[in-house]
């Protein structure tokens, strides 16, 4: 029998953040080899931070990602404030939560409508999708705009906001601004609820598999605080992270890979809702029961619905925080730096984001370590591709294999640029 090899090269994967590649080797109808490659060069933010004053950290780490800068800022200040034993006021804690909710809204809104949904309706882009569903896409932009408005409200601007500082905020918005923002968000919430009902009707592959969900948990739905738990029984604090999680270098990826006790795991909206669905507000619990809630779910294709549910949660929570908004006496508290190591984390739109900083007596950073969600999901993505492609059918044409692979990867909403500190596909077939 004549050996046959097929190679497909696609310069970059559309509708993800950053660039990557996927190599498949198929022999006798079986997937023998798979590599999910991230080849973007490292950006060395951890080294940039060395020698910088702790007060510079929030603005520097915000530049790691234009989609989720608040996540980097909150994880950073959580770590530094923990080290410095800063006692935040209730107002600061509430406004940090509100700012984070804004980021969830803009990130989830963008992902669902611009990156993910076109796949499920046979379109190549959101522009094509808008031709068939103009009102739904317009609704998605309104949701994203609500998030951007919240980020501008507290951060000064929606991209790389500058409002956060170690100890609080640089400035407090006015009550009038808060009331105007609340009015707009009130108008968006019914639209978001209609979006969730629409998403629940979207046909998705029934690809159920076993995976370990990892997420923060707290007395309320987690954003910027809590303990880290997993569906396998993990329950740890920030400073215990490196005892259980280890990073390693893979020859085919410039991004580090993360494993929990040697195994791959899932972070992100599906992991969060799997472990915290009982902490969603009553009106969302009722909506999910009405829709036949799939949560907790072992099907990664439910990630889009999980993002939709989190959008509704974020809007409702933002309204509650704005309803009680009052101008504070001061927007920040005093910070007295000291030498040592601080640990912090938070739930970025894409999942857990962990930071560690060592600081000297002068308040300068001597060492920094940042573990973003996408690097934590890399091993899980490869395992998912192995399973999902086999379920999809390896005898499918190369173009369909590529499209399905991209669809699987987009479930994780990978921010590849953040992970390196998409899709070029090569397929090798042997009969």
Image: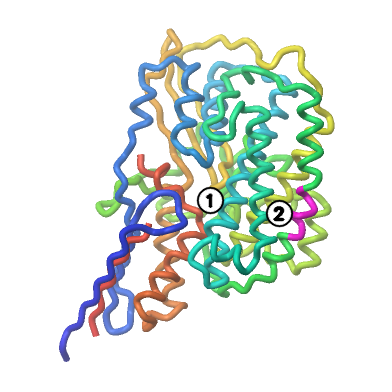
Question: On the image, which quarter does residue 425 sit in?
Answer: bottom left
| Image disc number at residue 31 | none
Magenta span: 188-194
Q: Residue at x 68, y 35 (%)?
A: 150
Residue 213 in the image, given as x and y percentages of width and height: 56, 54
Q: Residue at x 59, y 17 (%)?
A: 85
User: In the rendered image, which quarter contains the N terminus?
Assistant: bottom left
Asked which quadrant contains residue 42, the reply is top left
Q: Is residue 312 above or below residue 126?
A: above
Q: Secondary structure at mark 1?
A: loop
User: Residue 225 placed where, x, y %?
Assistant: 63, 35
Q: Which residue corresponds to mark 2?
A: 277
The image shows residue 138, relative to residue 40, as above or below, that is: below
- The answer to whether 79 appears left or right of 143 in the picture is left
Q: Residues within 10 Å of mark 2 (few under 14, many from 20)?
A: some
- The residue nearer to you, when weighing 191 against 82, is 191
In the image, is residue 189 part of the stretch drawn in magenta?
yes
- Assign a secondary structure to mark 2: helix
How far apart are the alpha carbons under marks 1 and 2? 15 Å
User: Can you identify the residue that label 1 sits on?
Assistant: 267
Which coloring applies here?
A: rainbow
Most prominent secondary structure in the magenta stretch? helix
- Image x and y of residue 24, in percent: 31, 69
Q: Is residue 11 left or right of residue 206?
A: left
Q: Can residue 376 be seen?
A: no
> x, y percentage for residue 214?
55, 50
Q: Is residue 269 left or right of residue 316?
A: left
The number of discs equals 2
């Amino acid at each position: 029998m004549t050996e046959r090899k097929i190679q497909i090269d696609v310069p970059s994967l559309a509708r993800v953040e950053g660039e990557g590649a996927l190599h498949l080797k198929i022999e006798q109808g079986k997937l023998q080899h798979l590599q999910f490659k991230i080849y973007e060069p490292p950006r060395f933010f951890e080294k940039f931070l060395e020698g910088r004053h702790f007060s510079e950290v929030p603005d520097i780490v915000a530049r790691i990602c234009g989609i989720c800068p608040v996540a980097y800022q909150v994880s950073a200040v959580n770590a530094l404030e923990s080290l410095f034993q800063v006692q935040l006021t209730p107002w600061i804690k509430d406004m940090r939560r509100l700012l984070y909710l804004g980021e969830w809204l803009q990130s989830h809104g963008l992902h669902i409508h611009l990156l993910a949904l076109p796949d499920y309706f046979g379109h190549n882009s959101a522009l094509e999708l808008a031709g068939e569903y103009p009102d739904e896409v317009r609704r998605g932009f309104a949701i994203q705009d609500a998030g951007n408005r919240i980020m501008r409200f507290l951060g000064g601007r929606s991209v790389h906001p500058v409002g956060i500082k170690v100890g609080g905020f640089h400035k407090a918005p006015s009550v009038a601004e808060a009331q105007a923002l609340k009015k707009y968000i009130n108008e968006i919430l019914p639209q978001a609820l209609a979006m969730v009902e629409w998403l629940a009707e979207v046909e998705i592959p029934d690809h159920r598999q076993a995976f370990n969900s990892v997420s923060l948990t707290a007395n309320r739905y987690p954003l910027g605080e809590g303990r880290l738990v997993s569906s396998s029984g993990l329950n740890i604090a920030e400073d215990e992270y490196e005892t259980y999680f280890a990073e390693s270098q893979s020859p085919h990826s410039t991004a580090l890979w993360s494993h929990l006790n040697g195994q791959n795991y899932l972070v992100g909206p599906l992991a969060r809702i799997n472990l915290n669905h009982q902490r969603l507000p009553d009106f969302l619990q009722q909506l999910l029961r009405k829709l036949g809630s799939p949560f907790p779910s072992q099907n990664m294709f439910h990630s889009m619905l999980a993002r939709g549910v989190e959008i509704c949660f974020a809007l409702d929570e933002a309204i509650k925080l704005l309803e009680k908004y009052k101008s504070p006496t001061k927007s920040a508290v005093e910070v007295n730096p000291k030498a040592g190591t601080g640990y912090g984390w938070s739930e970025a739109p894409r999942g857990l984001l962990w930071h560690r900083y060592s600081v000297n007596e002068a308040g300068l950073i001597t060492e920094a370590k940042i573990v973003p969600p996408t690097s934590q999901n890399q091993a899980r993505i490869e395992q998912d591709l192995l399973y999902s492609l086999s379920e999809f059918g390896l005898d499918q044409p190369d173009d369909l294999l590529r499209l399905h692979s991209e669809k699987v990867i987009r479930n994780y909403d990978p921010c590849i640029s953040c992970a390196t500190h998409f899709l070029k596909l090569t397929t090798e077939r042997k009969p």
